[in-house]
Image (tube, rainbow, N blue to C red):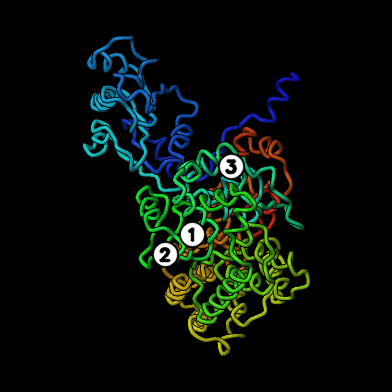
Amino acid sequence: MTTYERDATTLELPWPFAGREDELELARRSLTGVRRGIVVTGPAGCGKTRLVTEAIRGTDCARAAGTPESRAIPFAAFAHLLPESVTLHRAVQLLSGVRTLLVDDAHLLDDASAALVHQLAVHGRTRLLVVATAGAPVPGAVSRLWTGELLPRLALEPLAEEETGRLLTAGAGPLDALTLNRLRRLSRGDLRLLRDLLGAVRGQLTPVPDTGERAWRGPVPLTTAVRERTAPVLGRSRPLERETLDRLAFAEPLPPDLDDLDLGALEALESDGLIEVDDHGAVRLAHPLYGPVLRAAAGRLRARRLARAPEEYAAALDAECADLTRRIDRADVRATAKPVGEWQVAEGGPLPGGYAAVRARYARLRGEVREAAAWAREGLRSEPAHASCRAELHRASATVDSPGDLGPEAFTDPYDAVRLGAPDQAVDRLGGVFARHADALTRADGPELDAVAGELERRGFLLFAAEAHAQAVRAHRDPRAARHSRTRAVALARRCQGARTPALAGLVLGELTARQRQIVTLAAAGLTNRQIAERLTLSVRTVGNHLYSAYARLGASDRGALPWTAHAPQAQPA
């Protein structure tokens, strides 16, 4: 027992499954009825194997997998399922009795194994789940599974931002928005790399005051896993090429001085995919993780020689701040790269309060309310008395944590009256798309509210667009138009980091199934999972699963968010 407890501290537990509900349902349906299976493709590390593993959970399924080392050995992937020497015909006969077969890393199959998988699909007695990495060379017998229409293909995209956030929360608890953004940016959709990074920084997470969140600031730890992921740059041995990589790493996030870089080294690095050159001639390291790792691996003297002067970053921060302010004045808050501020926060450096307040306001206007609160806190960390940062933190936190406080006193500009449903108080004090919103709401014009929502979305105001669509639901006389408005409102609201406003209150419970609404209501009343299970004659595990799905759909992280959800008014029937 003592040995087990000691070992358990380093035991790597399975990565929680989160997101991809629709894809999971599709994979599960491929195993039922007359269906013969499915092929799942996607980029390396996007969660293909985890998806199909979740789909076959609880079923009797045989497994096989290709490996680089065995591509020259006939039937190597099926060696554990077949006799020592076998023909293709005999292999098909033997495996036709297998009800379900998972074939992982099918792009690495030897030719005989690939032919066997193809023939099993032709015979149709075995249900096949075949996993292959997109972009990698695939045996012709495998690619013909979908090009020949033997099996349908599910092409996975990298996990969406919202779902990646839920995955990280499930794996490490609540993280602040800037930490989530940094981990997503560094991993670039590779869930295996994301897991490595999260494991590496777990011990460096620090509590964020007055929240239940934790944050990661400072350099990337050079663990074994991180070194393996960045071996192409860390292992570059030619002096000019390594010097060029280091100069690029220490130039980030500012453009490098190309006159200081060797052209031959740049061409070699570009050829090997380690750097990228955009249409304007700007040179960047090819992966967001390369720069932080190269900086962390450099000694103090090398870092001192290559590092930019502090005043260069200060000037760049001022330029970013001015650009964000101009965009806000033009009512255009679409996503835009502002790497200097992100780099400053990631490195753990002080962030000027003025920059942080503008960055927080920009994020809040985009509907990124948790990110807005995080930027405001960064400004207050440097300047605790900064009034604009305090104001932005209050507005962002009220939208996330205290929806019951969202009365008129919580809003300070004329457009907020429109969002509260009192457009007559502001219609003469607004211009542009905001005036159109006030006018359409005054006239209860559903189609015009939808048009306004579309314009707000194009300009980047996702939360305002969601609210306009939600208001259109009640204004429409056509039930079909109302359903469309509600669908758009829900889709946009789910991208707003758990924002809760009066206009959105009627949407939340309508997004749940009847059973989920029932369980959420009881949980919000304070009942435990076991008490809910006893009352509804369900298993405790079923109750937990329903609650987890409800959290995901509502943007809630735990039971603490449910009382507001459960007491929100029901959506109008469409």
Considering depth in this image, is 522 or 21 the residue closer to the camera?
Answer: 21
Is residue 163 at least partly visible in the picture?
A: no
What residue occupies the far bottom of the structure in this picture? 428
**Element under disc 2:** loop
What residue sits 68% from the left and 27% below the top?
8
Residue at the spot of label 3: 546
Disc 2 from disc 1: Cα separation: 36 Å
**Is 222 situated above or below 82?**
below
What residue occupies the far right of the structure in this picture? 385
Residue 158 point in image, percent of width and height: 44, 48
Considering depth in this image, is 257 or 92 the residue closer to the camera?
Answer: 257
Residue at the spot of label 2: 282
**Is 7 situated above or below 417?**
above
Asked whether disc 1 touches disc 3, contact meaning CB atoms under 8 Å apart, the reply is: no
What residue sits 55% from the left and 86% below the top?
430
Quadrant for residue 423, please give it: bottom right
**Element under disc 1:** helix
Disc 2 from disc 3: Cα separation: 49 Å
Quadrant for residue 418, please give it: bottom right
What residue occupies the far top of the structure in this picture? 84
Disc 1 from disc 3: Cα separation: 20 Å
Residue at the spot of label 1: 491
Three-letter code for the amino acid on which mark 3 is drawn:
His
Asked whether disc 2 touches disc 1, contact meaning CB atoms under 8 Å apart, the reply is: no
Q: Earlier in the sequence, mark 2 or mark 1?
A: 2
Q: Residues within 10 Å of mark 3 (few under 14, many from 20)?
A: some
Three-letter code for the amino acid on which mark 2 is drawn:
Ala
Q: Look at discs 2 and 3 and give the one toward the viewer.
A: 2
Three-letter code for the amino acid on which mark 1 is drawn:
Ala
